[in-house]
Image (spheres, grey):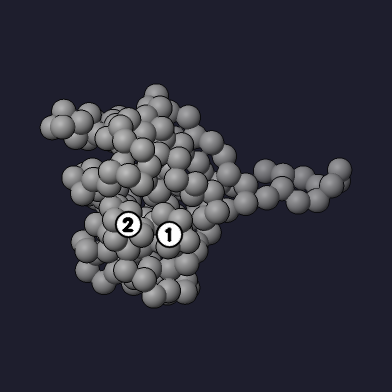
Amino acid sequence: MKNAFVRLKNDLQTLTDDLYETEFFTSGKVLVIGCSTSETIGKHIGKSSSDEAAEVIYSHFSKIAGQENMHLLFQGCEHINRSLTTSRHTMEALNLEEVTVVPHKEAGGSLSEFAYKELSDPVVVESVIADRGIDIGQTLIGMHLKHVAIPVRTSVKTVGEAVVTIATTRPKLVGGPRAHYK
């Protein structure tokens, strides 16, 4: 199992290196992370939550978000309606609405639970309209992204054993044949 976490750390570092090349991590942007820790260790989603994988993933992305001054939210599973764990600072800065739930392994998942325990002033919010998203294990984060999502391709196709999907967003193109765009 130790090798699984070494691979997980290596995959996250390679993924991060690739994303830095695309200017994915941008100050002030909102980043949603969805993750099945079960999938990262090669198990069925929701069946083998891993505190160890949650710690690795949380630590990795919270460090980046802090360095890059990004708002970071961790999506929970369908048992808490895919609500998001974040800091009170992010909730207030983005004018989000708090909901009442404490994520745990069986309702929210290990990553949301870990984030809730690690954040100094954690809250859970129902939704966000994010600029960026990383979905590890096909947890369906699309509901929390701006309307025009753009896939980001990297050399990393899996994080641990979990399929990874990355998206950034752009504003909608509005108008018709006479409209001009940058």
Q: Which mark is residue 71?
A: none
Residue 144 as seen in the image, left or right of residue 117: right
Q: Position of residue 53 (x, y in %)?
A: 23, 43
The reply to whether dot 2 and dot 1 touch (C-beta < 8 Å) is: yes
Question: Residue 117, image x and y in percent?
Answer: 22, 63
How packed is label 1: few (under 14 Cα within 10 Å), some, or many (20 or more)?
few
**Above or below: residue 27 compared with residue 12:** below
Q: Which residue is mark 1?
A: 79
State the image coordinates of residue 179 (x, y, percent, origin top left).
81, 47
Question: Does 95 appear above or below 68?
Answer: below
Q: Is residue 178 left or right of residue 161?
A: right
Q: Nearer the viewer, residue 129 or 171?
A: 129
In primary-sequence order, the first of circles 2 and 1 is 1
- Report if residue 92 is visible in the image: no
Number of callouts: 2
Q: State the residue lying farthest toward the front.
A: 47
For label 2, the SS is loop
Callout 2 amino acid: Glu
Q: In the rendered structure, which amino acid carries the disc numbered 1? A: His
Question: Residue 148: where, in percent of width, then height?
Answer: 62, 47
Residue 106: assigned label? 2
Q: Tell me where residue 85 sits by quadrant.
A: bottom left
> Up-down: is 118 above or below 100?
above
Q: Residue furthest top?
A: 155
Residue 8 visible = yes
Between 74 and 155, the residue placed more toward the observer is 74
Give residue 1's quadrant in the image: top left
In-image side of 6 versus 62 (left or right): left
Q: Quick one: SS at disc 1?
A: helix
